Amino acid sequence: ASANAFKLLLENRPVWEEICADPSLIPNAVEECLRHSGSVAAWRRVATTDTRIGDVDIPAGAKLLVVNASANHDERHFDRPDEFDIRRPNSSDHLT
């Protein structure tokens, strides 16, 4: 995750300069780095019980691929989800 954060900050020099000028931005910048470019894109899981998510029935034993990278860029939850914004008010809502 830290390598991805360094890459984002190197690619976005004005953001780096903002953080240097105002270190109080660091906590939210870290959360936004994790949301935008987390180190783990997906997790494999096995459902332990029968469950239902939305309109989908998931039986116990079903193999799942939870793509948190996709969830972290869901436009229903994040305004301009593909934009790297260290001032995003809900940056910490990520699944990373």
Image (cartoon, rainbow, N blue to C red):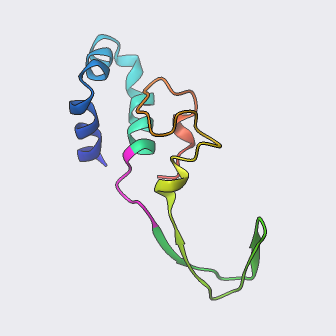
Residue found at the very far bottom of the displayed protein: 61
Q: Position of residue 72 (x, y in %)?
A: 51, 48
Q: Residue furthest top?
A: 21
**Image-based side of 63 in relation to 53, left or right:** left
Residue 41 painted magenta = yes
Nearest the viewer among 57 and 23 is 57
Choose top left, top right, bottom left or bottom right for residue 11.
top left
On the image, which quarter does residue 84 sit in?
top left
Point 71% across, 82% down: residue: 49
Figure check: 34 above or below 39: above
* Figure disc tally: 0
> How would you classify the magenta stretch by its main secondary structure?
loop
Q: From what the image shows, is residue 64 above or below residue 69?
A: below
Pinpoint residue 95: horizontal percent, then vertical percent: 52, 52
Q: Image point 57% across, 27% down: which residue?
A: 89
- At 59% from the left and 42% from the top, the residue drawn is 75
Q: Is residue 69 above or below residue 8?
A: below
- Percent position (x, y) of residue 32? 43, 36
**Relative to 83, residue 13 above or below:** above
Q: Residue at x 51, y 39 (%)?
A: 81
Q: Does 13 lie within the magenta span?
A: no
Residue 73 percent coordinates (x, y): 51, 46
Q: Read off the magenta span.
A: 37-42
In this picture, residue 39 sits left or right of residue 17: right
* Occupied quadrant, residue 55: bottom right
